Image (spheres, rainbow, N blue to C red):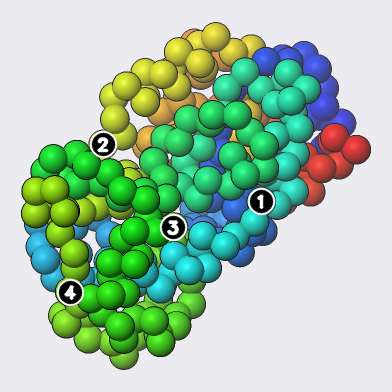
């Protein structure tokens, strides 16, 4: 299977690479879906719930406060480092990731397009002011000292499975500039990816020789749209993923294996 992927990359040397949660599981960050593409856990916070209710924001920030401590300490794994090496070798025309963990950058990739944003900063929904996630963590801890003593199992995207804590007591800081609602700098489920980010990614795909999906089931439309565009435009499409993908019916090459192992063997 490594040989087949090597042949694909030799034939199509400038790749548009799209990565998903499966790239970061070896770094200790859980993914959302099983090998059949079904939800492993409860559905994540939706945009309309977060913006529509204080209780939902209390639930989000109490869990995310706990999850961030482990999420932010995750280290790049073989998959991240291998993709960075492919990029340094001139084989990656553009890297687009659906992940919000910043691990591609830490592995050495240059300016990947973060399709769903990043958990490393927070933005005000009213005035647009941004602040580092560390500042939000500090503000939450100062207002809610009890949070420091809590622990919970890490969930996807820096969430945590926090039980036995009354989230209704959480005091959430407002924007220091305008008093508005603060939201993590990520695209929630049910929220649209910024149009400029999508168009930038489309342009990179159109200019590439082929598309390679790594560690993504493509079940979410924000990622699947690129596989569909590749098919419509006759751009060759390959995927490395442990389970099924939404694009299985029109993949030119599918490798069902751990993406880190496959890429590391290819480079070695």
Q: Is residue 76 left or right of residue 166?
A: right
Report, in whole angstroms, how far the alpha carbon at label 3 lies from the one at label 2: 17 Å
Q: Report crowding for label 1: few under 14, some 14 to 19, many 20 or more residues within 10 A (C-alpha).
A: many
Q: Between disc 3 and disc 2, whose residue precedes? A: 3
Q: Between disc 2 and disc 1, whose residue precedes? A: 1
Q: Quadrant of the C terminus?
A: top right
Tags 3 and 1 in contact by the CB under 8 Å rule? no
Q: Quadrant of residue 166?
A: bottom left
Report, in whole angstroms, how far the alpha carbon at label 1 lies from the one at label 4: 33 Å
Q: Between disc 1 and disc 4, whose residue precedes? A: 1
| Nearer-the-camera pick, 90 or 176 | 176
Residue on which disc 1 sits: 76
Query: Residue 171, labelled with which disc?
Result: 4
Q: Between disc 3 and disc 4, whose residue precedes? A: 3
Q: Is residue 189 left or right of residue 180?
A: right
**Residue 25: horizontal and vertical position, in percent?**
61, 58
| Nearer-the-camera pick, 234 or 94 | 94
SS of the residue under disc 2: loop
Is residue 94 something one can see in this rendering?
A: yes
Q: Quadrant of the N terminus?
A: top right
Residue on which disc 2 sits: 192
| Nearer-the-camera pick, 140 or 18 | 140
- Residue at 41%, 45% in the rendered image: 118
């Amino acid at each position: 299977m490594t040989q087949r992927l090597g042949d694909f990359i030799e034939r199509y040397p400038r790749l548009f690479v799209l990565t998903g949660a499966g790239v970061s599981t070896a770094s200790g960050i859980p993914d959302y879906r099983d090998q059949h593409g079904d939800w492993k856990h409860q559905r994540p916070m939706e945009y309309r719930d977060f913006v529509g209710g204080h209780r939902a924001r209390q639930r989000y920030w109490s869990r995310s406060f706990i999850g961030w401590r482990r999420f932010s300490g995750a280290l790049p794994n073989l998959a991240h480092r291998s993709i960075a090496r492919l990029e340094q070798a001139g084989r990656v025309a553009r890297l687009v990731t659906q992940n919000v963990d910043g691990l591609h950058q830490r592995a050495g990739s240059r300016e990947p397009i973060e399709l769903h944003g990043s958990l490393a900063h927070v933005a005000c929904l009213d005035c647009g002011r941004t602040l580092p996630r560390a500042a939000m963590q500090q503000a939450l801890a100062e207002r809610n000292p009890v949070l420091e003593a809590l622990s919970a199992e890490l969930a996807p995207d820096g969430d945590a499975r926090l039980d036995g804590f009354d989230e209704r007591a959480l005091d959430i800081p407002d924007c220091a500039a305008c008093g508005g609602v603060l939201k993590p700098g990520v695209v929630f489920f049910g929220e649209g990816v910024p149009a400029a980010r999508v168009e930038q990614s489309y342009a990179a795909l159109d200019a590439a020789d082929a598309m390679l999906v790594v560690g993504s089931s493509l079940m979410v439309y924000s990622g699947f749209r690129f596989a569909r565009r590749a098919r419509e435009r006759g751009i060759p499409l390959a995927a490395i993923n442990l389970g099924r993908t939404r694009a299985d019916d029109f993949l030119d090459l599918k490798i069902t294996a751990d993406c880190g192992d496959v890429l590391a063997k290819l480079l070695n």
